[in-house]
Image: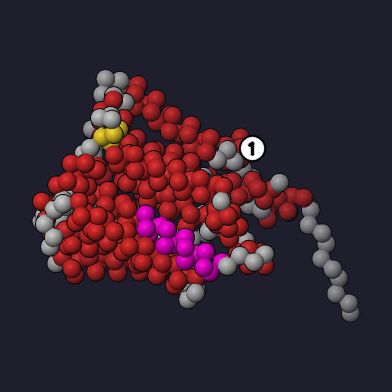
Amino acid sequence: MTAQAPAPAKDGQRKAARGPAVPPWLRRLARANESWTFGVLALLVAFFTAARPSTFLTRYDVTQIATNAAIYLVLGVGMTYVVIVAGIDLSVGSVLVLSAVLSAEYTIHHGGAGAGWGTVAVSTLIALVTGLVWGALQGWLVAKAKVPPLIVTLGGFGAALGVAQIITGGQDPAGAVSGKLQRTIGFGKLFGQIPWLVVIAFATTLVFGLVLAFTRFGRYTYAIGSNPESARRVGIDVDAHLVKVYALVGLLSGLGSVMWLAYFGSTSIAGHSTDNLKVITAVVLGGASLFGGRGSVLGTVIGVFIPAVLSTGLIIMDVQQYWQDVAIGVVLVAAVYVDQLRRRGTDRR
């Protein structure tokens, strides 16, 4: 008795297999990438300006928002590359802490708060190299050992923080930052107007945004995120590129640690447990897909400022700190849902 071939699926059955229907207007919104993200940012600014016209979006507020967002923007640039290659890095906050601690330990033993520019230069190099090496090690585990990036960076999150606590005994060391670094990079302003932290974040964003958009390294990043097997077949060394991408996010975590030390004057060991949430939120809000192959540094810039504006606005409206964390978490879930709509809309075309 011969088996009969299954009957072709009807249109209705095919649609059901693809999942529940999504309203056309919502699909169009989801596919708008940076456009809808910028619209959300504009709506938040308009809302808080209307609610507190005399206190929100003053010159002081704009400066503070930009300064507070600067470090997360630097971390977000690195995370953008990682997410585009369909990876994730949960360790950025802990790598920042470890880099800051090692940098601070050198400063403490070479002049402390009164240290000169030579000490500042070496301690900065220590922070950058620490982040670079830690990131490259995690990249090697992902690329060569084939350990899922979620597990590698979750382990890295705990390990980096643990090493920092072992070195310091769990206490933020005194005299960890040179006064020269704080007065110039931490509190200084270019032309007396633009904080140096904002300048550093802008320069970092510009450089790596151009690299992603216009160089072979950027093209390889998108290719690997879209289809790593196809990338291999056209001659791209996928494993080596993944190591470089994770090394990059580590390097930028090291840079973030220098900026943090300059601004806050402390390693703040216990103050970075949610950095990964904030950074991933910004990248996903900016249009990057957690499934890889799509994202932009411009989108991340917009995504970083949404939580920054949200937090500042809620503070001005006297909303408790705990609700700010709730709001950021809700925004992250909403962003991932929109990403799912993008993918579903693409599959339907």
Residue 255 seen: yes
Q: Is residue 245 magenta?
A: yes
The residue under label 1 is 24
| Residue 240 position in % (x across, y down) | 52, 68
| Residue 132 position in % (x across, y down) | 37, 62
Q: Is 249 or 316 nearer to us in this picture?
A: 249
Crowd band around label 1 with a 10 angstrom C-alpha radius: few (<14), some (14–19), many (20+): few
Colouring of the image: secondary structure
Residue 339 seen: no
Question: Going 28% across and 25% down the picture, which residue do you hit?
Answer: 59
Question: Going 16% across and 58% down the picture, which residue do you hit?
Answer: 107
Q: Is residue 224 magenta?
A: no
* Residue sitting farthest toward the front: 118
Question: Going 38% across and 38% down the picture, which residue do you hit?
Answer: 305
Count of all numbered marks drawn on residues in the image? 1
Q: Is 321 or 197 nearer to us in this picture?
A: 197
Determine whether, in the image, residue 202 is placed left or right of residue 323. right
| Residue 68 position in % (x across, y down) | 29, 40
- Which span of residues is magenta-colored? 238-252
Residue type (three-letter) at the residue carrying disc 1: Pro
| Residue 337 position in % (x across, y down) | 51, 47
Main SS type for the magenta part?
helix
Question: Going 48% across and 31% down the picture, which residue do you hit?
Answer: 39
* Residue sitting farthest toward the right: 1
* Residue sitting farthest toward the bottom: 1
Rendered position, 120 above or below 243:
above
Q: Quadrant of the N terminus?
A: bottom right
**Badge 1 element:** helix
Q: Is 68 or 314 nearer to us in this picture?
A: 68
